[in-house]
Image (cartoon, rainbow, N blue to C red):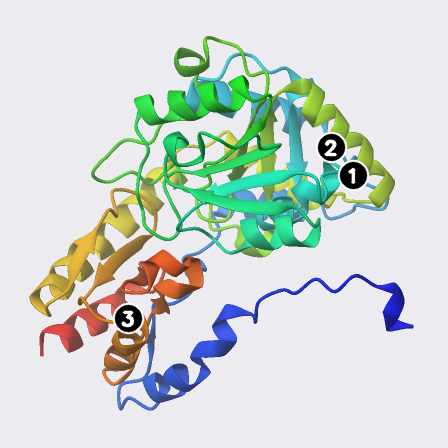
Amino acid sequence: MSGHFRPLNLPDFPWDTIAEAASRARSHPDGICDLSVGTPVDPTPDIGRQALADASDAHGYPLTWGTPALRNAINGYLMTRWGAPDLTDHGVLPVIGTKELVGWLPTLLGLGADDTVVIPATAYPTYAVGATVSGCRIVTAETPDDVAGERPALVWTNSPSNPTGRVADEAETKAWIAYSRERDALLVADECYGEFGWDAEPVSALDARLNDGDVTGIIGAYSLSKRSNLAGYRAGFIGGDASVVSQLLEVRKHLGMMVPAPVQAAMTVLLGDTEHVRIQRDRYAARREVLAPALVSAGFRIDHSQGGLYLWATRGENCRATVDWLADRGILAAPGDFYGSVSDEHVRIALTATDERIHSAAARLVA
């Protein structure tokens, strides 16, 4: 029977490869400081939880397209926060967490073996997994010049970057828009970490100043997981080219890819509130101010890390040796080789731990 199926040749699940280091870190007398995974640890805002509870009598099927109130909230957020032109509700769509969107997008667009997908050279692994599942050819790039000779169907950008925290400026963002349009490629800008700029201010590919007020061929991808501590709700959304959104809406309706109604209610309320975002920014900023100097004092160099929730750090050695060095001190980090072959001397160190664990990690680094 298995002969009927195309083997996907997916990589091993990355976190399985650091099980030994995790065990060693857990054996530390003061317990593990797990800085390897970017899962929020702070409370979901009360207004979101209340909205979820109030909508919990969800006896009917939710709309794949989202409620009119949610579509209006998404459009308003993109216009107000990211300078997008008015997309109307035809240019927005909720998704079941942005990882789902990243992993399934090439397939939902009907791409296959004849198509090329461009992904960042140092990148969140799911871009490559999604292209692999659909059978696409993958090429990596840091700038449009790296793939000048390619004719891709889909181009992924990610700013602030996971894992490096690198923030693309206006010129780079405009260059990717021009590159994609010249090749009739769809540009999908993963901007899920956009609320967290530290040493540089993130910009959006949807910004009317950068795309001349025309989002044709552009989709932005966003998440409330980090912005609103909503990772457990699986609450994401996209906005941009209405013709692409319409295609995705139709196929998602057929496949039953619906965000639960109570989650839609929570998203609607949280997208209209900025105070909880400010509070969360302050939390991450304070943790960064503790952890970054401790890493430098311990002999690390921090590269990029202008935005996002991670410090991209190196000791000038293979990343697995660094993971072991940290594990001996009860600290678990993600090795850079999770994110591409060019990243094997860095580790990704997350700010998504409690204040107490961040201070404990810092103390161990400088001891």
Which of discs 2 and 3 lies nearer the camera? The answer is 2
Q: Secondary structure at mark 2?
A: helix
Q: Which residue is mark 2?
A: 248
Q: Residues within 10 Å of mark 1 (few under 14, many from 20)?
A: some
Q: Are marks 3 and 1 in contact (CB under 8 Å)?
A: no
Instruction: State the image coordinates of residue 341 (x, y, percent, origin top left).
Output: 40, 60
Q: Is residue 38 visible?
A: no
Q: Residues within 10 Å of mark 2 (few under 14, many from 20)?
A: some
Mark sitting earlier along the chain (3/1): 1
The image's mark for residue 357 is: 3
Q: Are marks 1 and 2 in contact (CB under 8 Å)?
A: yes
Mark sitting earlier along the chain (2/3): 2
Disc 3 marks which amino acid? Arg
Residue at image location 62% in from the left, 32% down from the top: 153
Q: Secondary structure at mark 3?
A: helix
Which of the two residues, 157 or 226, is positioned nearer the viewer here? 157
Q: Is residue 296 above or below residue 80?
A: below
Residue at image location 38% in from the left, 45% down from the top: 161
Q: Which residue is mark 1?
A: 252
Which of the two residues, 136 or 157, is positioned nearer the viewer here? 136
